[in-house]
Image (cartoon, helix red, strand yellow):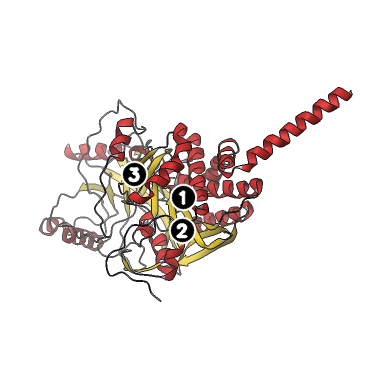
């Protein structure tokens, strides 16, 4: 018995020693916590299954934001709050939708209303017509003929069978090409008015005057039941404006759209029945970003930020866009809190997570935050002058390219961070992350920070089926998230955030444009 007790005591001591060693290095603990005790898929399920979709301005986004703030508090973060921005305008939430072909024979039509489409007056029934016009003059031949009808905007799009699959990872040659890319040319945010702008205005003014039952499109991609859907079109302004003139609009699956078009080509009359029941929300027009912090110590007045956009489109639950990024950032925050508890080592700089809203309509939330705290910008986010808080931010890290694992970092034309990031990626070569590219990448919230001189970075991620199957589509659901990839992302993000917080110096910055000063 004595020998058994001694053996038990020895094993217990070994276990304590192992735990002490395990907890002594924050970076090792981050990896262990994130890979072995991950909660990222459960976080993602709450964001998507329970609180999806999260269209900006919708009641569901408000509920999701309250849940996320509550979770961050439970994780142990401090200064958790909603930070208001706006005005954004009205929100929109779908309550019921159905579409059926009723002549020449019956079949259910796979389609989705476009966001901010108004409701119909119950079920409406009408003939399907194709509008063939390329300029305002050609519209006139349809004058007085569209009221109560379903208008097809597009021609047939050929559907080809896919023998290669929709999902893929970056090849070694593609990553090498990224690594060898030259420094990008700096560009400002611009507002383009293309040659078709005048016709676009004339077209949607014409629809408002004619009052068709609905205008139908079939998107530029998607097949086999995948429908890519976004927001409605209007002649002027934004559909979020309370006075916007919006006619009912829906996007139809390509197979059903083509079928109707082919019947029209044969001279066969097609009739549809449709009902949209939706409501406009967000009467005060304002929205909120979700902010939370882990306080720093000797450099607590300086900040390391990490974030993702929390809003989504409406046809699915916003899983890869961007429940993935939001889940990863919340999981990274949890990992950091647990690492601090286990090691007893505190961050030097304050760590701040941000979950943005309004990204899908134009980076509204992140740009508003940057404008409030870090810089004066024009309405498109271009830098005018710096605010004193700008110099306090060491970096901002972003995730918003789907469920694919991190393969490296887009350095946004900042070569000075290369040796730093190369060292930080070294431990993750076995997880497939090692590529650095000077290239810019766009379309998401790190641009709001990069535009005002703050080092802002989006990670390189494997493409998976993001652009081919899930991005802004009805298939963007939890089932298409890859657990191992999200775990890897959360670990790497937490590691980058931690190491940025512990450096003696902030990350190096790119030179500012000439003449840009700091407000006093």
Q: Residues within 10 Å of mark 1 (few under 14, many from 20)?
A: many
Above or below, comparing residue 261 to residue 352 in the picture: above
Q: Are marks 1 and 2 in contact (CB under 8 Å)?
A: yes
Q: Which residue is mark 2?
A: 58
Q: Nearer the viewer, residue 305 or 116?
A: 305
- Looking at the image, which is closer to me, 375 or 163? 375
Q: First in sequence: mark 1 or mark 3?
A: 1
3D distance between C-alphas at marks 3 and 2: 20 Å
Whole-number angstrom distance, CA of label 1 to CA of label 2: 9 Å
Q: Quadrant of residue 9?
A: top right
Which residue is at a point 51% across and 39% down the rendered structure image? 487
Residue on which the image places disc 1: 53
Quarter assignment of residue 115: bottom left
Q: Position of residue 26 (x, y in %)?
A: 58, 44
Q: Which residue is mark 3?
A: 228
Determine the secondary structure under disc 3.
Answer: loop
Residue 63, position as x, y percentages in the image: 54, 56
Q: Residues within 10 Å of mark 2 (few under 14, many from 20)?
A: many
């Amino acid at each position: 018995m004595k020998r058994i007790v001694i053996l038990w005591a020895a094993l217990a001591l070994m276990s304590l020693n192992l735990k002490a060693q395990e907890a002594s290095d924050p970076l090792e603990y981050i990896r262990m916590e994130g890979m072995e005790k991950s909660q990222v898929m459960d976080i993602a399920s709450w964001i998507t299954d329970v609180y999806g979709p999260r269209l900006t301005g919708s009641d569901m986004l408000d509920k999701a934001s309250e849940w996320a703030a509550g979770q961050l508090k439970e994780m142990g973060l401090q200064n958790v709050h909603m930070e208001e921005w706006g005005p954004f305008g009205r929100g929109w939430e779908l309550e019921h939708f159905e579409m059926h072909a009723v002549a020449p024979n019956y079949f259910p039509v796979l389609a989705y209303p476009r966001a901010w489409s108004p409701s119909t007056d119950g079920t409406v029934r009408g003939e399907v017509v194709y509008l063939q016009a390329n300029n305002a003059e050609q519209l006139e031949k349809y004058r007085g003929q569209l009221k109560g009808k379903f208008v097809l905007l597009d021609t047939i799009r050929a559907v080809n069978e896919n023998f290669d699959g929709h999902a893929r990872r970056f090849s070694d040659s593609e990553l090498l090409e990224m690594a060898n890319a030259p420094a990008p040319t700096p560009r400002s945010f611009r507002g383009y008015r293309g040659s078709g702008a005048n016709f676009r205005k004339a077209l949607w003014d014409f629809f408002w005057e004619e009052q068709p039952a609905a205008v139908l499109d079939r998107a530029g991609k998607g097949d086999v039941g995948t429908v890519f859907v976004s927001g409605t079109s209007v002649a002027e302004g934004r559909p979020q404006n309370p006075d916007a003139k919006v006619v009912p609009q829906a996007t139809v699956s390509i197979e059903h759209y083509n079928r109707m078009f082919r019947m029209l080509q044969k001279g066969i009359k097609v009739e549809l029945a449709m009902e949209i029941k939706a409501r406009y929300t967000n009467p005060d027009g304002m929205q909120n970003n979700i902010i939370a912090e882990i306080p720093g110590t000797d450099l607590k007045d300086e900040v390391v930020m990490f974030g993702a956009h929390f809003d989504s489109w409406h046809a699915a639950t916003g899983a890869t866009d961007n429940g993935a990024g939001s889940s990863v950032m919340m999981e990274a925050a949890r990992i950091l809190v647990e690492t601090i508890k286990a090691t007893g080592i505190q961050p030097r700089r304050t760590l701040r997570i941000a979950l943005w809203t309004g990204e899908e309509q134009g980076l509204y939330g992140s740009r508003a935050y940057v404008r409030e705290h870090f810089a004066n910008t024009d309405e498109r986010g271009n830098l005018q002058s710096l605010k004193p808080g700008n110099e306090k931010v060491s970096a901002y890290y972003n995730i918003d390219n789907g469920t694919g694992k991190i393969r490296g970092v887009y350095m946004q034309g900042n070569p000075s961070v290369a040796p730093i990031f190369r060292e930080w990626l070294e431990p993750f070569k076995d997880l497939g992350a090692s590529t650095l590219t000077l290239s810019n990448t766009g379309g998401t919230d790190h641009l709001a920070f990069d535009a005002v001189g703050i080092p802002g970075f989006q990670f390189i991620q494997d493409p998976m089926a993001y652009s081919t199957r899930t991005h802004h589509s009805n298939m963007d659901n939890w089932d298409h998230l890859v657990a191992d990839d999200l775990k890897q992302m959360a670990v790497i993000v937490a590691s980058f955030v931690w190491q940025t917080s512990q450096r003696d110096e902030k990350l190096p910055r790119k030179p500012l444009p000439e003449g840009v000063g700091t407000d006093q």
